Image (cartoon, rainbow, N blue to C red):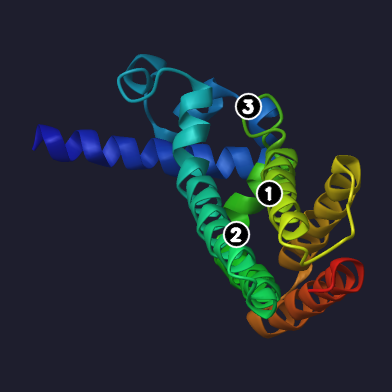
Amino acid sequence: MARNNYDDTHEKILECGKRHFIEYGFEKSSLRDICKDACVTTGAFYRHFNDKNELFEAIVSPVADKIFSNFFDYEKVSIDSVKKKQNEKVAQVHVDGTIETAMFLFDNKEIYSLIINGSYGTSYANFLEKLTVMEDDARIKMQEISLEADISSERISDKGFHIINHAHFLALTEAVLHSENKQELLENARLVSCFFSGGWKNIRGY
């Protein structure tokens, strides 16, 4: 019974924390108000989480970790395809990855919006920038492989990669947050994907 009470209280704190963070953002959410809403004392709260930041991380990390995991999967396939000179596959991975990522984010829209718009004061505050830097690194690796294999003669600067990649993530985020349903999201995600894939093909040939 005690274990069940602990689990119930834990879930209640998570539920109330999520509601407050979504409404007020991390910085303006009051730990005291979260505890009051969850019908627990602050002392009871600290038996579950060390602080407000740990509560926030418990709420958003499953989605954030999955985004990073998916990124590394797409990156591996892309780099392997460049090494094998499978240029069309690289382009297709980019298209498919953009659409699949958009669908996952839409399914977790509340949490993704919280990460993007309500995470100031946490380690997730620069989430899009972190994703962009990861994409920069992947693109730079692929460029070096392409140049060495004479697949492409176009060299893009690191800053150039960063500008394009950041714009891509911003566009994808807009599609996710502003689409009303999955059909609209699919249309918008395809639009974003085709726009950027077409640009890459025009610049580097694939």
Tell which circle, 2 or 1, labels the residue nearer the N-terminal end.
2
Mark number, residue 141 = 1
> Disc 3 designates what residue?
122
> Disc 2 designates what residue?
79
Quarter of the image for the N terminus: give it.
top left
Q: Residues within 10 Å of mark 2 (few under 14, many from 20)?
A: many
**What is the number of callouts on the image?**
3
Residue 80: quadrant of the picture: bottom right
Residue 177: quadrant of the picture: bottom right
Horizontal and vertical percent position of residue 39: 39, 31
**Camera-nearest residue between 121 and 7:** 121
In the image, what residue type sits under mark 3? Answer: Thr
In the image, what residue type sits under mark 1? Answer: Lys
Quarter of the image for the C terminus: give it.
bottom right
Q: Residues within 10 Å of mark 3 (few under 14, many from 20)?
A: some
Q: Residues within 10 Å of mark 1 (few under 14, many from 20)?
A: some
Identify the residue at horizontal 44%, vertical 36% (top origin).
58
Mark number, residue 57 = none
Contact between labelled residues 3 and 2, with CB atoms less than 8 Å apart: no
- Is 84 situated left or right of 117 in this image? left
Tell which circle, 1 or 3, labels the residue nearer the N-terminal end.
3
Contact between labelled residues 1 and 2, with CB atoms less than 8 Å apart: yes
In the image, what residue type sits under mark 2? Answer: Ile
Identify the residue at horizontal 62%, vertical 60% (top origin).
109
Identify the residue at horizontal 70%, vertical 49% (top origin).
135
Identify the residue at horizontal 54%, vertical 49% (top origin).
68
